[in-house]
Image: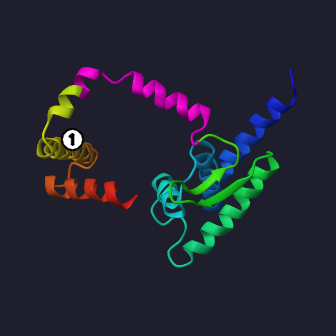
Amino acid sequence: MSTLIPAQKAIGVLLYDAEQRDITTARRAALLRILWNERFLTRSQLIARVGYQLGKNCFGISAWEDAFYRDMRVVKQAFLAAGLTLEYSRGKKRSGYYICEQDALSPEFMNMVKASAAEVDQRQLDIYRRLSPAARFRQGCAISDTARNVVAFRIRKENPSLTVQEAHQLALQRAYTK
């Protein structure tokens, strides 16, 4: 057995700890993971994905562009250390950051997509396709409303002194401020 595997596990523990305590390390690790799995993502797409994971203003409020580009320089160096080159394409069909000589999706990510697609019931898709655009919209709204109601219910369970309206306001804040 190689000693590299235990060392990689130990480094992983240290990195996880650093990510929990340092937002810069957390951003850089998130960027690396995202770019490892997906290619041709623009700056705004990467910022949105990292923001979803770490919080809306994780790159800062005033100098967020500088923070993003500093982080990308380090991520490029990390890929280079692994023998991979991170580039940016300005092509019309495919623009954004990508790892040279790699498919658009990592093999692991592609396997997850295939496994998820295999779970889809074709009968449900056929029914959904027959719905009018208005019915699809109503269905999407109903799903969102149900999710918000569940979150509000849980908030109220944790804080019984809140009114129903206050719990719904907190549920909306949680959905849109992260």
Residue 74 x, y percent position in the rendering: 73, 60
- For the question of whether residue 22 can be seen, the reply is no
What is the quadrant of the C terminus in the image? Answer: bottom left
Q: Which one is nearer the viewer's eye here, 23 or 160?
A: 23
Residue 24 x, y percent position in the rendering: 64, 62
Q: From this viewpoint, which residue is outermost toward the front?
A: 92
| Residue drawn at point x = 54 percent, y = 28 percent | 111
Q: Which one is nearer the viewer's eye here, 98 or 80?
A: 98
Is residue 109 part of the magenta span, yes or no? yes
**Left or right: where does residue 40 sit relative to residue 129?**
right
Name the secondary structure under disc 1: helix
Residue 38 x, y percent position in the rendering: 56, 45
**Position of 12 relative to 1 (above/below):** below
Q: How many marks?
A: 1
**Left or right: where does residue 49 sit relative to residue 150?**
right
Q: To which residue does mark 1 refer?
A: 143
- For the question of whether residue 161 can be seen, the reply is yes
| Residue drawn at point x = 45 percent, y = 54 percent | 52
| Residue drawn at point x = 19 percent, y = 45 percent | 149
What is the magenta range? Answer: 104-125
**Left or right: where does residue 131 sit relative to residue 144?**
left
Residue 88 appears in which quarter of the rendering?
bottom right
